[in-house]
Amino acid sequence: MDFKLPKKDIISKEIPRYPNIWFYVNCNIVEGYLEAVYLVILNLMKYCNIKNNFSENYRLRHILFNSNEGSDTEGRYKGLQPYTDIDDPSNSHDHQLHIRYYYKNLINNKSERVRLNISNRNIIFYRLALSAHYEVTTENKNHPLVEFCPICGRAGIYDIEVDQNDLDKEICRKIHDPLGVEILLKNTIRGNKMYNNRGEQIKFIERLKKDCDLVTYIVDTTDAEINTPKIGHILIKKINYGRDVI
């Protein structure tokens, strides 16, 4: 399927990597674009525990010194998969799924709507972009990475070559971003299911199906403009109080 993705500078001039998650909301089930944005963010908070619960010091640092990679808002699910390094306890850490949202520039550039061919029908969707990555929790001194962590670092299928002179960006693009797509759309990390301290499996987009009729796609990318290896697409066709037109 051709998702007709916009150019990176339309989304944000400050964003370092192309957004790796795209939500599409059927225009016929919401009153307008802001309601579509609200629907996505609210459901990720409600069902996926992705909340803007960063410390005040973190917020202040972004306000004073940078634009938080050009995002409009952000959220996370923290405290995931604690890792204990017995040989060097200073490397011990837990993880967070960190998400940044992009939608204002899409409005300003008249790119918030896209016509997609679904089942041989042309349907107009509202869309918004997310940058999702899995990393060491912000409050941990090792944030954003421990290079050889078996969960978020260079291990297993991610034992890949990286530029040591640009380690942070390389691991974010080649490891943390693909893990963000996997955890959101597949409910796994490196192919393994995740559980909370009550023994319940942690699920993400799968849980949105309680309120939304949706379909997901994961696409490998080769376009040089899209400098992230995988992109997840989530199409919301209807909500439980809306009208199904697909």
Image (tube, rainbow, N blue to C red):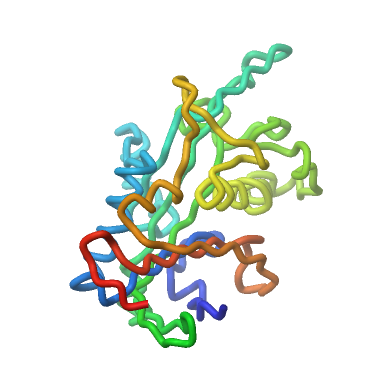
Position of 8 relative to 19 (above/below): below
Residue shown at the point (70%, 71%) measured from the top left:
222
Task: Locate residue 168: give its quadrant.
Answer: top right
Question: Which residue is at 26% across, 76% downward?
Answer: 28
Q: Is residue 202 left or right of residue 46?
A: right
Give the camera-side residue of 66 and 49: 49
Q: Quadrant of the N terminus?
A: bottom right
In the image, is residue 118 above or below residue 132? below
Res. 77 image quadrant:
top left
| Residue 175 x/y as whole percent | 66, 47
Nearer the observer, 52 or 27: 27
Left or right of 124 in this view: 194: right
Location of residue 235 in the rendering, given as x and y in whole percent from the top left corner: 43, 67
Q: Is residue 68 left or right of residue 168?
A: left
Residue 172 is situated, as x and y percent measured from the top left of the image, at 61, 48
Q: Is residue 170 left or right of residue 244?
A: right
Name the residue rendered at 59%, 41% in the picture. 188
Q: Quadrant of the C terminus?
A: bottom left
Percent across and percent down for residue 22 are 46, 64
| 76 lies above or below 224 | above
Question: Which of these two is toward me, 196 or 102?
Answer: 196
Determine the residue positioned at 61% across, 40% down.
189
